[in-house]
Image: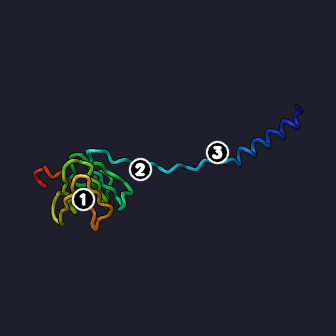
């Protein structure tokens, strides 16, 4: 193989590789974080999108788990009902009870605190 022919072959091969779809890989979308069995999960946006926080014991203020604007959708994957409040500290502004297995794809108000129903405050 002559040096000129070798250079031409390498240039052609690099063009083929640069144009191939495998060479220009698009970033893969980030997989959604799963909501595990025996966890209560809240998402920062409706339709189970945005930041997600998972609970087994509840939270006085979900902002501490990255949901600074509260939880706008919920999924109860536990075997007991959970109480959710629209304000931090399990107080005021109303409360909603979410049954085992129930999904709330969108709420009118963001949840700011939550506890399993068995807890004395619920």
Of residues 48 and 69, the one nearer the viewer is: 48
| Mark nearer the N terminus (2 vs 1) | 2
**Marks 2 and 1, Cα distance to the nearest angstrom?**
22 Å
- The residue that mark 1 highlights is 112
Which disc number belongs to residue 43?
none
For residue 81, side relative to residue 49 (left or right): left
Element type at mark 1: loop
Residue at 27% across, 47% down: 39
- The residue that mark 3 highlights is 22
When the figure is inspected, residue 109 is found, relative to residue 36, above or below; the finding is: below
Residue 63 in percent (x, y) is at: 28, 55
The quadrant the N terminus occupies is top right
- The residue that mark 2 highlights is 32
Closer to the camera: disc 2 or disc 1? 2
Residue at 34% across, 52% down: 52
When the figure is inspected, residue 113 is found, relative to residue 78, above or below; the finding is: below
Residue 54 in percent (x, y) is at: 29, 48
Q: Residues within 10 Å of mark 1 (few under 14, many from 20)?
A: many
Q: Residue 70: tell me if it is visible.
A: no
Residue at 70% across, 46% down: 18
**Marks 3 and 2, Cα distance to the nearest angstrom?**
24 Å
The quadrant the C terminus occupies is bottom left
Element type at mark 3: loop
């Amino acid at each position: 193989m002559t040096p000129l022919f070798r250079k031409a072959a390498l240039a052609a091969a690099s063009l083929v590789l640069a144009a191939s779809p495998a060479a220009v890989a698009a970033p893969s979308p980030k997989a959604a974080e799963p909501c595990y069995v025996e966890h209560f999960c809240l998402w920062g946006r409706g339709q189970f999108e945005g930041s997600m926080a998972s609970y087994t014991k509840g939270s006085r203020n979900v902002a501490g788990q990255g949901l600074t604007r509260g939880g706008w959708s919920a999924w109860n994957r536990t075997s007991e009902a959970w109480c959710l409040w629209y304000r931090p500290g399990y107080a005021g502004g109303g409360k909603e009870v979410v049954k085992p297995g129930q999904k709330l794809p969108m709420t009118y108000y963001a949840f700011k605190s939550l506890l399993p129903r068995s807890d004395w405050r619920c």
